[in-house]
Structures are given as structure tokens and as C-alpha cells.
Image: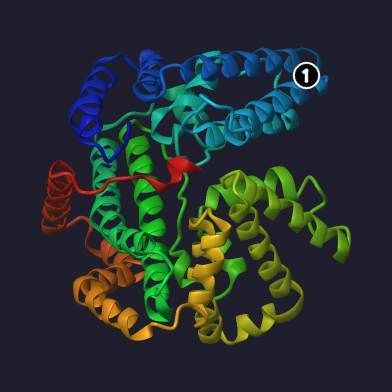
Amino acid sequence: MLFSGLVFIFRFLPIFLFFYIVTPGKYRNFILFVGSLIFYAVGEPVYVFLLLGELILNYVCYCGFIRNKRHFRLILPIVLDVAALVVFKYMLIPGLSMPLGISFYTFQLIAFLMDERKKARKNPVRFLNFATYIVMFPQLVAGPIVQFKEVHHELANNAFSWEKLEKGARTFAIGLSFKVLLANQVGTLWNSVQTAGTVGLGFSNAWLGAVAYTFQIYFDFLGYSLMAIGLGRMLGFELPENFREPYSATSFSEFWRRWHVTLGRWFREYVYIPLGGSRKGTLRTILNLLVVWALTGIWHGAGWNFLLWGLGFFLLLVLEKFLYGRFLEKYKILGHLYVILLLPVSWVIFGITDLSVLWDYLRCMIGMGDDRVFAGFSVFLRYMRSYAPLLMICLLFATPYPRRFWEKYKDKLWMSLLVIFFFCFSCYEIAIGSSNPFLYFRF
């Protein structure tokens, strides 16, 4: 079930909220747990049993660790969690699809166990609180990747309020608008360029398609993250921010502190630092970065393009760290140009899974594609007549200025009416059958 689907918005969510609100506070976690399982079962009924099995296994091993502090009791569930992820995501067994959200809830299970290993609890967290933390539907299938410490207080106190419900609804509506009115619309341009193929594509169309995909993936995932944060807030939870204007970065090191923040945090805290981080010399630092970025690429998918994408960022980050990072810090305008020129290339590598097509597309981007440039340029002009206003709007909303405008005027009545208008317009676009995929369900 998609957050940006009418079934979720006008059926599941109102019914769930009714039961959640009228239920006494001490029973709300149970309602959230059951409601989340129903949400998951609508799309993946068979895999509910896998999810429940992983919850029980992890909790039993966790309780065993609390009793006698033997660390191998935590190693076993982590190994099995990773094994389940590998089997369902990478082994491509015929008739076996990838369970929605397995990449995200597996990382939360691992984070919970590794964080609990450091604590000196005498009694385990209640099973219902643990299970609700893992399966709560706002972040179950696409993140943000939440740490238990970020929601444990709300789980213990059921801090629902009408004020949070109203604020969360506004955040959800904004996220829906980004997803439907920007990501989905600009995605049609990227789809058109891909469908046309690389024969005769030309330099201009290749870059136009790459820029379109650069905006699509940003507003797609930003919109979904905002919807998740808004839903969490409606239920009384403050889920962590996942994007901080990443396209304003002046280096790729900064970009990855702003893009998919909770994923970067997970790899930093549970892989990079345990491996030694940057504390054990230059060669060890490079090796640790290699491991992190190879895993980051593989985490997104089984295709070779994802590994190439991760290794490409590894190379850029190593070069910034040891060669020209200070130059980028000093000359921020040049740093920003460097980022915005290479980002579309990186997203093309990320988005095209067929390596032969990817190679041809990259050749077009550097001017080594088909020679029929006049036909290609006429297509480019036609695309620009149709999509130039949308691309300019995407460019504007990728900057920090709309957020500053929102913070200044968010309490004004006219701003609330504007949010309602865009929410209704988004629902209309969904209802008339506009393309409404969610890219990160693949990852």
C-alpha cells in the first residue's frame, strides 16, 4: 500500500486514526502494532509471517542477552537477519519476490541489538514496545531508519495530541505534493528519454534526462520521507529528518551528510566506527570507507550498477578527504558546481541497471553518442517547451529558500489554505490515473 494512494489516504488512514484516537493511551501501542501488520499485509500478506518470525527470534535472543550478557546471543539474530535479507533481496529465487521494506526493518533490528549491547539494562524492553518500534507503518517500508532511543519515550507514554495531529497532517500533505506534483511529473520526462533509447539520443537529451531523474529521485524520496514523518507526528512520534537540502552541498562529503541522513548515520555508527573509522591511519581509513560504500551500493540492489554507484562515491569521498577537500571548502561556488555537474552522472549510474545501456547513455553524456545531433536537438527543444516550467519549479524547491519561506509563514491562515489546495490537487492527480510509482520500494 502506497502512502500516495487513495486507498491509504481515504480508507486505511481515517479508519486507523479513529481507532487509534478513541483507544485509551495504554493500549495505543497494540492498535499501532496490529494496524501496521494490516498495512503490511495489504501488499505482502505472505511476508507478514517472515516479519513476525524475525521479531520473535530477535526478541528471544535479546532477552537471553539481557539475562547473562553473552554477546553471541546477539550475533546469532544479526547473522540470521542479514541472511534473510540476502536470500530475499539478492538470490533471485524464482517465485520469490523481495518483501517490502526488508532493507529498512532489517537495519532497524540490527541497530536495536547493537545499541542494546552497550546498555546496562536489567530488564528487557517490553515485547510490544520493541515490535511496535520495528513495524510501525509510517517508517516500515521506506524509512527513515529510526533508532529505538528516538521513539522509546513516545512508546512508553503514548504522547498523542491534537496539535501533533494537525502538524503531522500538514507535513504529510506537503510530502504528498512533492511526490505527486513534482517527482511523478518530472519522472515522465526521464521515462520518455529512457523509452526512446540511446540510439540518436545525443548530448542534450542525455543531460536533460539525467537532470529529470536527479529531480525525480530527490522529490520522490523526500516526499515519501516527509509523509512518513508527518504520519509519525500524527500518531505522537517525532521521526528523524532524512533530507537537508542535499542539492545545496558544496562537496560530496557534505552531500552525504544531507542526503538520506538516517542511512548515512546507520553506516557510520554500525559499520564505519566499529571498523575503526578514521582512527587507525590513512590506509585503514580508506579500507573502511571502501567497505562502507561497497555495502551502501549493494544495499540498494543486486545489480552491478549499484556497486559501481557506491564505489564511485567512495572514490570521490577519498579524493575530497585526502586531496582537494580543503579547496572545495575555500571556494564554495566551485564546489557547488562540481557537485551539481557530477550528481546527474551518479544518478544515471544508479538508475540504469543494464550495464550496456548505461555505458551507451554515459557516452552520450560526454558527447560520444550517436552523430544524429540535429534530430536529437529538435527533440530536446520539444521537451523543453513542455517541461521547462516544471524543471524550474523543481530547481527552486531543491534550494533552501522554500523551507525558509515555510518557516516564516507556516502559521498563517493563507498558508494552511495553500497546503489544503495542493493536497486536493495531488489527490486529483492520483485519481485521474497519473503515474504514481515509488522508486525506493525497489531498494
- Residue type at mark 1 is Arg
Quarter of the image with the N terminus in it: top left
Question: Residue at point 66% right, 85% down?
Answer: 327
Say above or below: 242 vs 6.
Answer: below
Could you say which quadrant of the image residue 400 lies in? bottom left
Q: Secondary structure at mark 1?
A: helix
Q: Is residue 246 left or right of residue 421?
A: right
Q: Give neighbour class at mark 1: few <14, some 14-19, many 20+ (Cα, 10 Å).
A: some
Q: Residue at x 40, y 73 (%)?
A: 201
Q: Is residue 89 above or below residue 303?
A: above
Residue situated in front as seen by the camera: 189 or 379: 379
Of 398 and 295, nearer the camera is 295
Residue 405 position by quadrant: bottom left
Write down the residue under mark 1.
Answer: 73
- Percent x, y for residue 437? 33, 45
- Inspect this view and state whether residue 343 appears: no
The percent position of residue 164, horizontal first and vertical second, equals 29, 38
Q: Residue at x 47, y 22 (%)?
A: 132
Q: Residue at x 59, y 53 (%)?
A: 306
